[in-house]
Image (cartoon, rainbow, N blue to C red):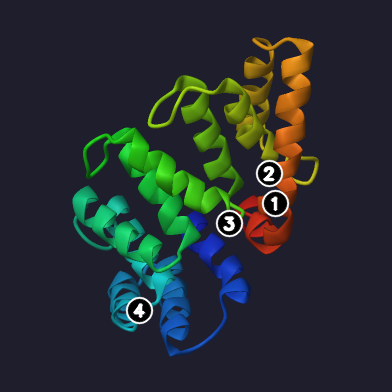
Amino acid sequence: MSGKRIVGMIGALMAVLGSGQALANTRTGISAYQRGDYATALREWEQGARAGDPQALYNLGVAYAEGKAVPRDQARAVTYYQQGASKGSVLAAYNLGQAYRKGEGVGVDHAQAAKWYRYAATRGHFRAANELGILYAEGKGVPRDPIEGFAWIYTATHVEIMDSQALNNAMQLARTFNSDQIKVAQTRGQTYYQRYMAPNRATVRALMAR
């Protein structure tokens, strides 16, 4: 995943996140990163991070994960993701879930991955919902529950989203269900969509714009 695509998504989210000096630093850092001025980007994000902006913390995590602006350091990236997620960054929470699932910069911990995927998914991150669903389907970090897994994956297959990976996962899982199980799983998935995705359409749109 390229830094340009990641910071571009952050730019799309700015309208959702509000304003203030810390966010101004983050915006300036994004512009600098996109034009390859990494020194300025880091300086602005570090200022934003000191002011407590979760998106600045997230972007610093991305910078260390990519290794373009600074030497690649996955462990340090995880530290920034942890700080950003604890302050409310949905994007940092998703990346933290990915780090725990893959063991990048931290030991593999599926329970922690599920925790942070859930945090992001309940705030409109449909890709986190798909990942959480896979964990339920496989019984990793959470009790094995294919119906619950399908329900989370299903939120990302809604007509307004139609995530291709989620569609493939949902179809594969559905082949293991009988007709009654499919009805239960779809109904629960529709409930989760209305509860978690529909109220967070701005986040959904920003993710789809990547």
Instruction: Determine the residue positioned at 32% across, 52% down.
Output: 66
Q: Earlier in the sequence, mark 4 or mark 3?
A: 4
Quadrant of res 35: bottom left
Residue wearing tag 1: 195
Q: The residue under label 3 is which amino acid type?
A: Arg
Q: The residue under label 1 is which amino acid type?
A: Arg
Quadrant of res 124: bottom right
The reply to whether dot 2 and dot 1 touch (C-beta < 8 Å) is yes
Instruction: Determine the residue positioned at 35% across, 79% down.
Output: 52
Quadrant of res 29: bottom left
Q: Residues within 10 Å of mark 1 (few under 14, many from 20)?
A: some
Question: What SS does tag 1 mark?
Answer: helix
Residue wearing tag 4: 52
Q: The residue under label 2 is which amino acid type?
A: Tyr
Measured Cα–Cα span from mark 4 to mark 3: 20 Å
Q: Earlier in the sequence, mark 3 or mark 1?
A: 3
Res. 2 visible in picture:
no
Q: Is residue 65 left or right of residue 203?
A: left
Q: Residues within 10 Å of mark 2 (few under 14, many from 20)?
A: many
Single out the mark in the foreground, 1 or 4: 1
